[in-house]
Amino acid sequence: MPAQNHAPRERRATFRFYEELNDFLPSERRKRDFAHRFIGTPSVKDTIEALGVPHTEIDLILVDGQSVGFDRKLVGGERVAVYPVFEVFDVASLTRLRATPLREPRFILDVHLGKLARYLRMLGFDALYQNDYDDQTIVAVAGAERRIILTRDKGILKHNAVTHGYWLRATAPHDQLREVVAAFDLARRIRPFTRCMACNGVLHPVEKSAARHRAPPGVVEDFDDFAECETCGKIYWPGSHFDRMRGMILDFGF
């Protein structure tokens, strides 16, 4: 009696990724249909992430023209179209109902993005960062505090617990700041010098008399406006550092 072949049957689906999602793919798969072979009936989420695209970058999945969730099982023969966040609809020409968005963006950054964290704080954005954060801590804090993970590590965005995250394409901190501001439509939310660049705390005005014994010698005599971080107590004043940062913000074009 001939031996029976019980090897799992290989299946195939056709995938197409749109716009910036192609950044995660090898060049031969970018901006074109390609066949993907698989065994069993994996979820569309697991398959997409196996192809290298984090689920946090995705806004819409169409399987044979029908919108589906991440848990949709693939059986073979499907055409899967995957769209990035904000890419499906062109909102540039739409009328904005409010001067600022209703939601307040809050970020947590991985250990490689310390300078970006300081730049975001300089513009007034809530940006958590510590150089000893591990992936588990970042994911846990992001979930508990509803923060968006900013990272250069694609792997962290593939954690099942991550709901909001963004993989930075740029490597230079200045370019990363421009990228984040554009990606999250933050230009209208910029409030420079309202957060502590050291610890991310909120700054509040403080009387000159209260700053007298906490600022460097001579500073209180030369300046009248002071702010204090509500978290770490650091004192700020509009000195030469303030002028340099203001010039930097102008250079960014914000």
Image (cartoon, rainbow, N blue to C red):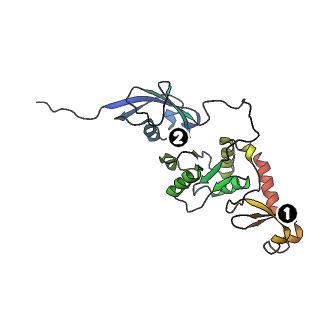
Q: Residue at x 75, y 38 (%)?
A: 98
**Residue position for label 1:** 225
Residue 196, label in figure: none
Residue 7 screen position, x and y as percent: 25, 35
Quarter holding residue 215:
bottom right
Task: Specify few, some or many for label 1: CA neighbours under 10 Å numbering under 14, 14-19, or 20 or more.
Answer: some
Amino acid identity at mark 2: Phe
Query: Horizontal placement of 241 versus 104: left or right?
Result: right
Query: Horizontal placement of 166 versus 125: left or right?
Result: left
Indicate whether 73 appears above or below 128: above
Indicate whether 176 appears above or below 111: above
Q: Where, quadrant-wise, is the N terminus in this rendering? A: top left
Quarter holding residue 209:
bottom right
In the image, 100 versus 26, the foreground residue is 100
Residue 120 screen position, x and y as percent: 69, 53
Residue 24, label in figure: 2
In the image, 158 versus 38, the foreground residue is 158
In the image, 139 versus 32, the foreground residue is 139
Quarter holding residue 44:
top left
